[in-house]
Each structure stands twice: as C-alpha cells, then as structure tokens.
C-alpha cells in the first residue's frame, strides 16, 4: 500500500514538474529565463515574414539559429552552475553574465540580418526603372535641405541625404517620398550605396562598420561589424564585396558576404591596395576591381561550396601621370572601356585594346560628371577664363567632342551620377534635378578647346608681363629722379624710409605703381595691345599701391582652328613687342643657378662669344641674382629673358631687348624646373632650349661659342 502511495506521489510530482519546466533542457530554460533582447525577436519575425514556409533555406536557417541559441546558453553560464532540476525561476535568480548575453545576441542579429538582407536583395525592384525624361525638380522632404543623393541601378529609387544627416528614400522621377530613414550623424559623407533593386541602403558608420537599412520601411536590417567600404553588389551571386576592417580602418582585404549561405570569407582573388570595384555584367558575373594604377577583370561563379572567383585579365595604367582618382570608374562603350577622373583630367581606358586616352580637360571642364549614353557623359564646362561661370556640355568620349546643352532647366548645381544607369542628378538650392533627356547643340573638338584655353592663358601671362615690365621701368625712373615725382599722401604721417627706397621695395615685392592688377573676373586675352612705353616722363602716382581696372572679355569666343590661329598671332605680336622679331635661325641658350656662389653681391658673369647664329639668352635663378653680361666683338645676342623666384637684375645688355620677370628657374637639367623653363622658351621664342648650363652656386659662364 505504501509503495502505491509513493508511486502515486512520484507520478503527481512528475506531472506537476512537467507542467512547469522539468521537461525542458537546461539550455532551453536558460534562454527562457534570459530571452534574446527585443530587437532580435523583431528581426526574427521580419525574416520569417519574408520567406515561404516551404523554402528549403528556412530549415537550414532554423538549424543555424538553434545552434546559436545553444551556444548562447552554454557560453554565458560557464561560471554559473545550473542543475538539471533547477526551474526557470531559479535560473532567473542567478548572476548570469549580461555582457556575454549581449555579445551572443549581437551574433544572433548578425545571423538574422544577413538572411534578411539576402531576402531583400532577391525581391523585385522597389519601384520600376522608367525613363526620366527632361529635368524634373525633387524638393527635400520635411524641410530638409538636400546635401547629396545616391540612386539604384535597376530601380526608380533615390536616397536623399540632408545637411543634418537625414536620409529619405524617394521614387524618381516623381519625387514621391517612399520612407523616412534613420538620421545617422556618424554616417560617412560619401561611402554609401543602394542595392540595384533599390530596397537596401548600405552606409559606412563610425569609419568601421556597415549599416544596412530597408528603404521601404526605414527599418534597420543589419549592422555588419568590422566591415567598411561596400565595393560592389553582386545580386546575380546573392553576394556583396566589402572591405574587411578587422585589421584597422582601410587596412583590410576584400571579403565576400554570401547571403545564400549566410557566411562571409576572404575573396578568393588576392588583391593589393584595392580602392574601387565596378560591376560590369551579370551573365557572366564580371567586375573590375583595383587600385589607382592596377586593376583586374574577375569572373564569379557559384558552386555547391559557395562563390568562386578567377582573374580573366589584368591591367595597368601606363601613362605616368594618370591614375584612378575618382571614387569608381564608369563603364562606357557597352562595357568595352571605362572613363574616370585622374587628378583634374579625364581618361578613357579601352579594356579590349588597352589603349589609353588622356585629355587635359581641366582647361575646359570640371571633374563632376554623369553617364549620358554609352559614348558620352554630362559635364560642366567653364565659361570665359576667370569669370567663374559654367555651362553644361555633353562630352563624347569616343569622338572627343563637346556639345553645348541648350536645355535651360536643371543646368546649374553639382552634377551627380545615377549609379549604374544613364541620366543625371543635380543639387542646387535645397532641391535636386533628375533627368535623362536634354537638347544639345553642335559639337566642337575638345582638343581645339583645350588648345584655345591654353593659348588664352599664355596670352594673359604675356600681356600681364608686358604691363609689369613697363611699370618696373616707370618705378625705377621715379626712384632715380625724385624731384619729378609727385609727393605721396599718407593719412598717418610720412613713413620713416625715403620715398625711393619705398618704391624699390614695392618693385622687389611685386607691387608696381600704375600697373593694372589682374582680378579673378578679368579676362587677359582681350585687352588691346599695349602701347609703347612713354619716353621719359613718369606717369602720375596717386598711391603706392596698385590700381585695379576692368579688362574687357576676349572678343574671340570660338575655339575653332582658325580662332586659335588668331590667338597664336596675338601671342607672337606680344612677344615681338617685348623681344623684337626672333630670327628663324636663332638658337636658345639657357644659364641657371640657385644663387651666386657664396651669395656674392657681385653676381654671376656671363661671357657672350662671337657666333654665326643669333642667340636668345635665358637666365634663371632662385635668389635675386645680378647677371653681368660681357659681349665680345661679334657677339650675336638678339634677346634676353631673365627670370627667377625673386626678381633678377641684368647689367651689360646694352640695346639688346630684355625681359626681366618673375617666373621659372632651373639649375640642373634633370630637375623639376627645367621642363617649365623649356616651356617658357617655347612660349617666348617658339623654340626649345638648345644648350643648357647650370650649377647651384654660379660664378662665370660662357655662351655663344
């Protein structure tokens, strides 16, 4: 009887315990006592709502999630003994490591987040990709001033960023708001991207992590720790390429995050100093990825083990001064070439022929651009030199021509590329314009425009030098004959130094009385040819400071070959006024020093020997050297150009035409200044330097023999 009673009590106890929690494992009880934090549960619900119940990947995810939960419970209770018969309430009273639970919850969020992002990437476009048409205005929402924007390549979606780091997803071209996204003050200003289907925003935060946000709901999807720049979306592989930040910001390699398997691993192709990647095609899956000078064409394939990658071609930019300095190149000519900014210029690299074409485009157009077609990009061209105005052009990279944009709407503001698609976005005064349809005028040769702008700058420099040269002569005359110079007026009394010393110091420092000083709004090429310097009488001098006067814009508006010939003739006319006509058989000899030896005040002596050929002598120095010329009988010296960082002095020139100026200097032929000095020779004489002599500290040189 007692045995029956005992057995009954045991059965009742077991039944009560089963009703409580005795049937649960220790792991289950720990996770019930200390459940994952609310955001984990919310993300789990979101994920399950996006996946079909019969999806094969759901079973594998549940298995991975259960494994993570088990690891969570076991890891965080290592220092706390928990018995098999301890209840959930008993476990709640234990001092479980809360930091451990938080760390394990972060891993659960990462597991769920990577799955959600993968599911979002596999969905259709958030908004259809449609033609944008003529420029349309999109205003900032909720009184936010727009700072910049990024677009999706296969959807009509743009994410706008406000000046206070507010983010908003909108559809284009209507500008209708889709969702308000989180405000992220710690977000990178440039390092963010939208998935091709427009559903996911990936943005670098705190210079270390990558935050994924749902563009439809504004919900956070995943914070990828120790992951920096997103190099490329690979939707056809259900993967992305990112920068590994575990070894420090900017120092990590390339990591492939595989959303199909929920894993991440180092990219199979070893890369060095990579800074950009460009997705070229989906079938086959190909991309370019590289650094400033080198890049590789890589093909991706999916196997049962994951995503494999192999190098198809390798490239290196051979042009010494060229490199990829824009954030990412743009695919052109149906993927046969890429266009990118190098320094201040544009370059085209042909992926099939490896041909490189570098334009000195900074003379004519700015660096901001947007892809307009497979052969052209939209750029802003500069107006007349030094006017500060711009005008949009269509730059055909195949034909190297610029066509003026005639559409008035949306022609001002900073140009942004619509990532991976044709069209443009412009930011201007709290609004942006988007469009992919513009009216363009007659194309002109870019090379002719570059040549014309260079000629304008050269003419500007020469005409300014002509004015300065005359001003120096006037200042020196006034210093030598002070009895004829008008008295200077000083509001606070006369200076302590004498007037002639004051004038000379002004000249040494580049301040010249009665000289027209160039202002940013002045155009140099337009001024009428300067008249010959007055004989002896100095011009009135109302103030020791330079007076400014407006200069008319250049009458030559075209950059055709004929117009450029007129500019060349104007340059020749200006140099002829200053140096005289240079004989066709003349040669240029150059002498350069850093300073006179031991900084001797006696200067550097130059002997000019007898010669059959006429000689143009170029003298250059860093210090304010005194050049003493000594001509032998029969010396055939036709012109002198003396330049330097400091203003030089020339004696013994006699009646030989002489230009003294601030400018280039060189004292060794393999130095950086020699090329610039040779360019000066070409500008002033039309001839290169035929003979060069140089030394750091000079004493005596012989030319003409």
Image (tube, helix red, strand yellow):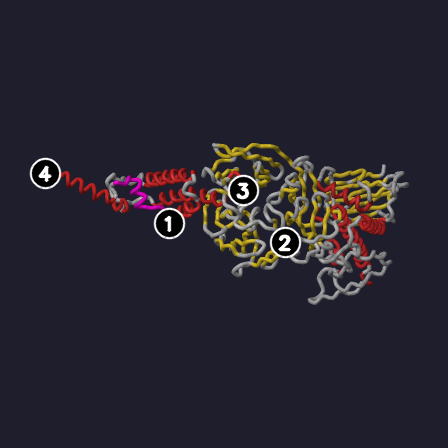
| Residue named by callout 4 | 2
Name the N-terminal-most of marks 3 and 2: 2
Image x and y of residue 579, in percent? 84, 49
Mark 4, secondary structure of its residue = helix
Name the N-terminal-most of marks 4 and 2: 4
Name the N-terminal-most of marks 1 and 4: 4
Q: Residues within 10 Å of mark 2 (few under 14, many from 20)?
A: few
Q: Nearer the viewer, residue 334 or 94?
A: 334
Mark 1, secondary structure of its residue = helix
Callout in the foreground (1, 4): 4
Residue stretch rendered in magenta on the structure: 23-39
The quarter of the image holding the N terminus is top left
Q: Which mark is residue 38?
A: 1
Vertical arrangement, residue 259 with respect to residue 417, above or below: above
Q: Are marks 1 and 4 in contact (CB under 8 Å)?
A: no
The part of the image, by quadrant, that contains residue 98 is: top left
Q: Which mark is residue 233?
A: 3
| Residue named by callout 2 | 133
Mark 3, secondary structure of its residue = strand
Image x and y of residue 341, in percent? 65, 44
Q: Nearer the viewer, residue 328 or 673?
A: 328
Residue sitting farthest toward the front: 54
């Amino acid at each position: 009887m007692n045995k029956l009673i005992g057995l009954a009590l045991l059965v009742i106890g077991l039944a009560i315990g089963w009703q409580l929690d005795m049937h649960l494992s220790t792991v289950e009880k720990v996770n019930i006592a200390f459940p994952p934090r609310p955001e984990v549960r919310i993300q789990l619900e979101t994920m399950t709502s996006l996946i079909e119940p019969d999806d094969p990947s759901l079973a594998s995810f549940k298995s991975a999630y259960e494994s993570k939960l088990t690891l969570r419970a076991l890891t965080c209770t290592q220092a706390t003994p928990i018995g098999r018969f301890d209840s959930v309430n008993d476990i709640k009273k234990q001092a479980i490591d809360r930091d451990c639970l938080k760390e394990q919850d972060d891993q659960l969020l990462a597991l769920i987040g990577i799955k959600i992002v993968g599911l979002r990437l596999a969905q259709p476009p958030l908004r259809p990709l449609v033609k944008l048409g003529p420029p349309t205005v999109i205003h900032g929402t909720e009184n936010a001033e727009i700072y910049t924007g990024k677009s999706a390549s296969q959807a009509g979606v743009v994410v706008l960023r406000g000046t206070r780091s507010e983010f908003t997803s909108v559809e284009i071209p209507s500008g209708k708001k889709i969702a308000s996204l989180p405000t992220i003050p710690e977000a990178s200003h440039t390092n963010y991207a939208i998935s091709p289907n427009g559903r996911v925003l990936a943005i670098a935060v705190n210079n270390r992590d990558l935050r994924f946000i749902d563009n439809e709901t504004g919900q956070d999807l995943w914070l990828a720790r120790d992951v920096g720049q997103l190099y490329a979306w690979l939707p056809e592989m259900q993967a992305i390429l990112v920068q590994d930040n575990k070894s420090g910001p900017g120092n990590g390699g390339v990591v492939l995050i595989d959303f199909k398997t929920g894993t991440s691993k180092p990219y199979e192709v070893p890369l060095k100093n990579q800074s950009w990647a460009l997705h070229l095609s989906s079938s086959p899956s190909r991309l370019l990825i590289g650094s400033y000078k080198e890049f590789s064409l890589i093909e991706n394939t999916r196997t049962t083990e994951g995503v494999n990658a192999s190098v198809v071609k390798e490239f290196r930019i051979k042009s010494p001064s060229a490199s990829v300095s824009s954030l990412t190149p743009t695919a052109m000519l149906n993927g046969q070439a890429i266009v990118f900014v190098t320094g201040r210029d544009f370059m085209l690299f042909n992926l099939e022929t490896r041909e490189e074409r570098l334009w000195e485009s900074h003379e004519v157009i700015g660096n901001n651009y947007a892809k307009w077609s497979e052969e052209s990009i939209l750029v802003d061209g500069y107006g007349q030199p030094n006017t500060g105005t711009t005008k949009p052009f269509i730059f055909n990279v195949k034909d190297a021509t610029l066509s003026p944009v005639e559409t008035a709407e949306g022609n001002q503001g900073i140009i942004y590329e619509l990532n991976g698609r044709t069209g443009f976005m412009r930011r201007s005064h709290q609004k942006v314009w988007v469009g992919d349809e513009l009216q363009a005028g007659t194309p002109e040769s870019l090379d002719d425009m570059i040549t014309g702008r260079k000629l304008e700058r050269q003419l500007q420099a020469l005409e300014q030098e002509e004015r300065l040269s005359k001003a120096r002569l006037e200042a020196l005359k006034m210093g030598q004959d002070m009895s004829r110079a008008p008295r200077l007026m000083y509001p606070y009394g006369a200076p302590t130094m004498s007037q002639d010393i004051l004038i000379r110091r002004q000249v040494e420092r580049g301040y010249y009385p009665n000289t027209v000083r160039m202002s940013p709004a002045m155009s140099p090429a337009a001024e009428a040819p300067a008249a010959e310097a007055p004989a002896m009488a100095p011009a009135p001098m109302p103030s020791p400071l330079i007076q400014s006067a407006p200069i008319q814009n250049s009458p030559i508006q075209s950059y055709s070959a004929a117009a450029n010939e007129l500019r060349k003739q104007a340059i020749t006319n200006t140099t002829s006024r200053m140096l005289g006509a240079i004989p066709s058989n003349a040669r240029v000899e150059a002498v350069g020093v850093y300073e006179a030896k031991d900084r001797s005040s006696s200067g550097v002596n130059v002997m000019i020997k007898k010669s059959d050929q006429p000689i143009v002598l170029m003298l250059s120095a860093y210090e304010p050297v005194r050049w003493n010329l000594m001509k032998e009988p029969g010396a055939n010296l036709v012109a002198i150009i003396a330049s330097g960082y400091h203003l030089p002095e020339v004696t013994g020139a006699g009646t030989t035409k002489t230009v003294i100026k601030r400018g280039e200097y060189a004292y060794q032929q393999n130095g950086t200044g020699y090329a610039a000095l040779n360019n000066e020779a070409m500008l002033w004489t039309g001839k290169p330097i035929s003979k060069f002599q140089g030394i750091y500290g000079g004493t005596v040189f012989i030319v003409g023999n």
